[in-house]
Image (cartoon, rainbow, N blue to C red):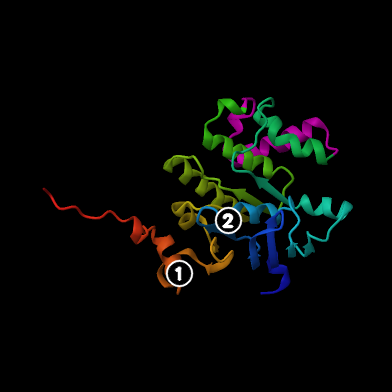
Amino acid sequence: MNDHDIAIAVKGLKVGYDHVVVLKDISFEVRRGEVFVILGGSGCGKSTLLKHLIGLFEPMAGEVWIEGVNLVAAEGEARRRLLRRFGVMYQSGALFGSLTVLENVRLPLDIFTDLPERARNLVALGKLKQVGLAAAAHQQPAELSGGMQKRAAIARAMALDPGILFLDEPSAGLDPVTSAGLDALINDLAENMGITFVIVTHELPSIYAVADRVIMLDQKTRTLIAEGRPEALRDHSPNPWVRQFFKREAEPSVTATPTTPT
């Protein structure tokens, strides 16, 4: 695999807040066009890692290379150009309630392009069509279901035609049927549009449905403890905790103790 095949390269990343280290020695690569999942137990640092990957925070050490450019070192116009190469869908969707769905999706175009309004509307409507929401273009976000809000947020993240999409807990709060529909959309966008996805989640059904590869973070060691296909890690990981996670097995200490009838 040559450098052109790598969409993202993370090298020796160390992240945290106020001198408290959350994760250290994090290194991995994301291939172009794959669906790459970051997972782990609660409090392991998944969302913290994501925030550093998209440049919201500066790492304590290490590098984040996106399409051959070091995000950590990029400044000024070079950094702004790099930030336009990827889109982000936050866990809540983060839609603006005072704007219509179309206006929400159009917002990046309003900010970053000089296209006339009619062209911006057409592009935004096209993105809504891609996620199955064209009929909801003139509704307010509050009128949409949770799943529709997530789709609208993905459409907005796609507004500038980025090659990479970061999704933070896309299935959170969704029922199984709606979640499965979102999984199908992610697979469709990856397969038919060649979009590279980096997804933070701990939803096992979604992980098995969409992930080409995963990395697993661990709160105790504060680093990466597994990488590979989810089925391979479930069946063959040398780490028993990794196998337990993928098989959704309870800790022995919380297993109910049989009682003797009186």
**Pointer 2 local density, CA inside 10 Å: few below 14, some 14–19, many at least 20:** some
Q: Is residue 76 visible?
A: yes
Q: For residue 232, which numbered disc appears in the image? A: 1
Residue drawn at x 82%, y 41% is 112
Q: Which residues are magenta?
A: 114-140
Residue 10 pos. (x, y %)? 69, 65
Which residue is drawn at the image coordinates 63% and 60% (left, top)? 33
- On whether residue 113 falls in the magenta region, the answer is no
Tell me, yes or no, if residue 63 can be seen here. no
- The quadrant in which the N terminus is found is bottom right
Nearest to the observer: residue 54 or residue 26: 26
Question: Of all residues shown, which one is farthest toward the left?
Answer: 262
**Which is nearer the eye, 41 or 91?**
41
* Mark 1: secondary structure: helix
Residue depicted at 46% across the width and 68% down the height: 233
Judged left or right of residue 26, residue 259 is left
Mark 2, secondary structure of its residue: helix
Extreme-front residue of the structure = 262
Given residues 32 and 135, the one toward you in this image is: 32
Q: Amino acid at mark 1?
A: Ala
Q: How many marks?
A: 2
Residue that numbered label 2 is attached to: 191
